[in-house]
Image: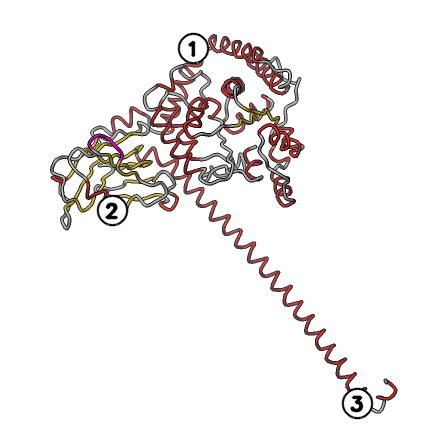
Amino acid sequence: MAGFLANVGYNAGISLLPANEFNKKGYFESKLIVGEHDRLLESLGYTWQDIRPLPLDWLQQAGIAESKNRLAHIFQFEFAGDHPLVLKDPRLCRLLPLWQGLFDEVGIAPCYVLVLRRPEEVVASLLHRDGMPVNKAMLLYLAYLLDAERYTRKYQRVVVRYNALLQDWIPLLAELDSAFDLQLGELSPAVVEQVSQFLSPSLKHFNAVPGQQAAPDVAARLAERLYSALAAPSEQTDREMDDIRASFEQHLASLEPWLSEAAQLERLKQEVVRPGPLFHKIAGQGAMAQLFWRDVGGGISEAQSVRAPLAFGDGMQCLRFALPAAVSNVGGLRLDISDRPASCEIVGLRVVDAQGGPVWQWPAGTQMFEHCSKDMRLIDPQDACVSLRVVVTGGDPYATLCIPQPVVDQLAEGWSVLVDVSVALLTASVPPLLDLAAQRRQSLAEAHSALQDMALKMAATAKLAEAQQDQCRTELLRAEAQIELLKDIWLSDGRAEIL
């Protein structure tokens, strides 16, 4: 659905998740937003696979306001410009209350599209991709869809059946245009062809056969009831949806010991796959980040520095470097992000005055570091959208901060340099780095293939042009011969006969 809207002119974001074997046409999800959503859920003790309802007061819990600010920052970058936008991530089903507050703050009136697939197809997809047990996948289907229905109830929304989208998208687009007053106008033949090629039958990987499920349990019966209610919105009532939700919550209550144990097992599994909180706490004990300043024309010394404690594997944190009275005549600032090998993601750099008022903030997408030591490597510096990934590998990692000199000249006692960063041990960062390397190899392979195709097309074009040139030469020689013949006849004794 998001790809369909992107093909008719909607902006789906800049830093999209790459396609893979499970979705070869792409996900049309911002990897920055998905990453922040995962961090937010982790801060609450959840993952995207968690069936348990979020805490009633989750919006008021520590760190949520900072996560909202980061999402607002990412949102401004991802969807800059005048194009209409489409925002997609399944986690939105559960995190919509936060986004609705953000939309209110930036003056956006959202329109929601609920994409409805048969529960059996969703279960088959989760089983194939994640190896998720059938009963858990069915409960997850209910949890996400019920949250999505509840949080979008008072807003403009349209329920779209996935099969209908693939079978005949033109009347569906007209329905969306009418419901949301999109004012799309008539699509060009090129766009129609592009959309038709995108919405191919290959997008449907699993087909449900209603009525062939063996002895459906409570969750399966509720999922079928929910699907039927949403598939016939003209007959749907809020009372019916509330009744389904009440039955689902009652069923979850009976499963509570199993749900808590499953959540613990999921966290333990993550700890096996990558170092968890306890490992980070022990290995990162006493870790520090350090900010140095140098006098104009001077060097760097420990006496001209301040430190901030660094927490490993603890989600996003704000390092505060409060400047002492000794700061004066500063020529520049240097950041040592970690005193031990680590993988860091920096999402913000700010300067505030003694009262905490903002003085300067790193503009996303611009250079943050002027110079890095050989022990501090930037990963994809040209792709630094709203975050910068750094790998610290040695004993003296540092980088000169690109803070404008007029701001540096103002630094005084009580002012602070703030750095928003998440830090992990290198052992925890190996899997994503390997994923990044795999993505780069895939991009290079695709580029190489495209160059080969282009070379073949150019060779075919050159061969065709050569053949056309040969034909033109032949025609030219034939015409010259005919002209010579006519000239000979004209000048011969037969001229009178021609006249």
- Tell me where residue 428 appears, x and y as whole percent: 34, 33
**CA gap, disc 1 and disc 2:** 51 Å
* Residue where numbered disc 2 is placed: 373
Choose the circle earlier in sequence order: 3 or 2: 2
Q: Is residue 184 magenta?
A: no
Residue 54 location (% of width, % of height): 42, 17
* In-front residue for pair 180/26: 180
User: Considering only vertical position in the picture, is 253 above or below 454?
Assistant: above
Quadrant of the rendering where the C terminus is positioned: bottom right
Q: Please give the range of residues in magenta.
A: 354-358
Q: Position of residue 328 (x, y in %)?
A: 13, 42
Nearer to me, 110 or 293: 110
Tell me the chief SS of the magenta region: loop
Circle 3 sits on which residue? 491
Residue under pointer 1: 257
Q: Quadrant of residue 183?
A: top right
Q: Is residue 266 left or right of residue 336?
A: right
Kindly report which numbered mark, 3 or 1, lies closer to the viewer in this rendering: 3
Q: Secondary structure at mark 3?
A: helix
Separation of disc 3 and disc 1 at Cα? 112 Å
Work out whether residue 424 can be spotted.
Answer: no
Q: Position of residue 342 (x, y in %)?
A: 28, 36
SS for callout 2: loop
